[in-house]
Image: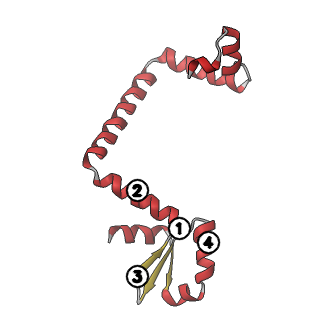
Amino acid sequence: MVLFEYMASISNVLPASEARNNFYTMLDEVNTKLKTFTITLRGKVKAILISPDELESWRETLEIMADEKLVKDIRKSQSEVWRETLEIMADEKLVKDIRKSQSEVKRGKFITEEKLLKELGINPKDLD
């Protein structure tokens, strides 16, 4: 029931009679505008109209969430990324160098990988 409540909170809620009268428009909007429609009957959620891509996304998410080991691995990876990010942010010189590099890229002061390899005499095919 929680999924239905969530979907109702982010979608257009309409009674079944209105959904019936606007069905083809709803189909178009679900597929072209990524809209979601919650259809009610006598005030209770009876159906949710979503695109096939959205349904597949929900299925994949549920499949991942059902795999306890995978969820644990994902959480561990997220934790490691946060730890590494904090370590980087704590290194003032590194942060300063990153900001300097970002500024230089914005000003066009950079060399492409292709040009660098050429200057170093490295054939890109040798890197594969």
User: Callout 3: few (<14), some (14-19), or many (20+) C-alpha neighbours within 10 Å?
Assistant: few
Q: Position of residue 62 (x, y in %)?
A: 35, 58
Residue at 44% in and 69% down? 7
**Closer to us: mark 4 or mark 2?**
2
Q: Quadrant of residue 31?
A: bottom right
Quadrant containing the C terminus is: top right
Query: Is residue 66 toward the left or the right of residue 26 in the image?
Result: left
| Image mark for residue 21 | none
- The amino acid on which the numbered mark 3 sits, given as a three-letter code, is Lys
User: Callout 2: few (<14), some (14-19), or many (20+) C-alpha neighbours within 10 Å?
Assistant: few
Q: Secondary structure at mark 2?
A: helix
Task: Residue under label 3, please give it.
Answer: 46
Q: Secondary structure at mark 1?
A: loop
Task: Residue under label 4, please give it.
Answer: 29
First in sequence: mark 4 or mark 2? 4
Query: Is residue 102 toward the left or the right of residue 6 in the image?
Result: right
**Residue 11, placed above or below residue 17:** above
| Image mark for residue 60 | 2
Alpha carbon of mark 2 to alpha carbon of mark 1: how far? 14 Å
- The amino acid on which the numbered mark 2 sits, given as a three-letter code, is Glu
Quadrant containing the N terminus is: bottom left
Task: Tell me if residue 90 can be seen.
Answer: yes
Task: Residue under label 1, please give it.
Answer: 51
Nearer to the camera, 119 or 16: 119
**Residue sticking out furthest to the top:** 120
